[in-house]
Amino acid sequence: MSEKEQMILDLIRKNPYVSQQELAEILGLSRPSIANIISGLIKKGNILGRAYILSDSQHVICIGGANIDRKFHIKDKAQLGTSNPIYATQNAGGVARNIAENLGRLGMEVALISTSGVDKDWSIIEETSSLYMNLETVTQFPEKSTGSYTAVLDSNGELIIALADMEVYEAITPDLLLKHDVLLSQSKCIMVDLNCPKETIQFLCHFAKSHDLPIVLIPVSSPKMSRLPDDLDGVTWLITNRDESETYFQTKIKNEEDWKRVLEKWLSLGISNVVITNGKEGSMIGNKDEGIFRVPPIEINEVVDVTGAGDAFSSAVIYSWLEGKTLIEIAKAGSINASKTLQSPYTVRQDLSAEQLQKDMEE
């Protein structure tokens, strides 16, 4: 056991209700550093759980998908109508869960509201996720299957086809959310993905508006853009991509002028801040106060896996915004976190921390 680990353990023995922030102030370390050391002590068995920690800060509430990501990587050129040699990987995934893990690794207090089955898939997700987020707000249904996302990727890591079983998220209803109304009303920010039913997203937008809370909407695919609320006035952030925006407005983004025009359309609906990502063209971000900016992509030599890159972008945007950064800094942070995730075989890159993201930004 290191000296810092021993000091933290001694302080917890003296006061089992000490918070991570208090430990950070006593030892002169950052709160994320304290969280990492505590995670190590939990893995070693010196601490049996995190129940002793009282949150000094409000939670970011992530609502939506928490599923198993199964990826089949084709070794050579993909051929339809025949057997393709592959290697397979499996990770915990889901848009809301991925964003929650990213934010947890960045040192934020996060709670996940989702639904699952009572099965092996959920056990895998729980084991992977519990260090980075509160899972007590996940409701389990014995008769349902935990959500799953199965992707077939070519030899360059690009997506060929994906199959999504997200039926369990239809159970994320307004009635279910009302069971967590106290947690929601005291939150730092609410983030919801479009795996949730439309009535649920409309309820959350109304709830956030009536409680003066920021809310972030994250589309998950073009077909689910129909789940956006009819009234978007008061939404704090919409983080979307070109295809999703084209689907919503039934238009094509062919050049930078079209791109900007569509972003202005989103803002005209009453959304405070909007990002439209556009693959290798980078991203465009804007609001009515600071204006609209295009941020070029980060050049990378090799894409290992595209899965989770969009969620990495969204989480860095949310984190940087909550940290008070400018629009350009926010978009750059998103691009950097996405580019690092593209170069990782994991859905959420394993080296992510607040310090590492800052170092990546400086580099």
Image (cartoon, rainbow, N blue to C red):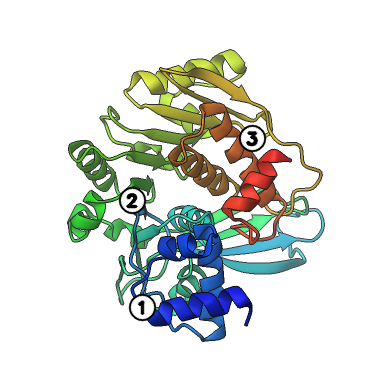
Q: Which mark is residue 16?
A: 1
Instruction: Give SS at disc 1.
Output: loop
Q: Is residue 330 left or right of residue 287?
A: right
Residue sitting nearer the eye, 217 or 133:
133
Cα–Cα gap, marks 1 and 2 = 37 Å
Q: Give the labeled residue for mark 2.
A: 196
Camera-nearest label, 1 or 2: 1
Q: Are marks 1 and 2 in contact (CB under 8 Å)?
A: no
Height in image: 17 above or below 255?
below
Q: Where does the image place residue 355, in percent across and percent down from the top left?
A: 62, 52
Height in image: 81 above or below 193?
below
Residue drawn at point x = 37 percent, y = 26 percent? 272
Residue sitting nearer the eye, 15 or 136:
15
Q: Give the labeled residue for mark 3.
A: 279
Q: Amino acid at mark 1?
A: Pro
For the N terminus, the quadrant is: bottom right
Q: Where does the image place residue 300, in percent across and percent down from the top left?
A: 77, 42
Q: Is residue 59 left or right of residue 287?
A: left
Q: Where does the image place residue 268, in percent across and percent down from the top left?
A: 36, 18
Q: Amino acid at mark 2?
A: Cys
Q: Where does the image place residue 84, in percent across and percent down from the top left?
A: 75, 63
Q: Residue furthest top?
A: 257
Query: Dot 3, crowdedness within 10 Å: few (<14), some or many (≥20)?
Result: few
Q: Which mark is residue 359?
A: none
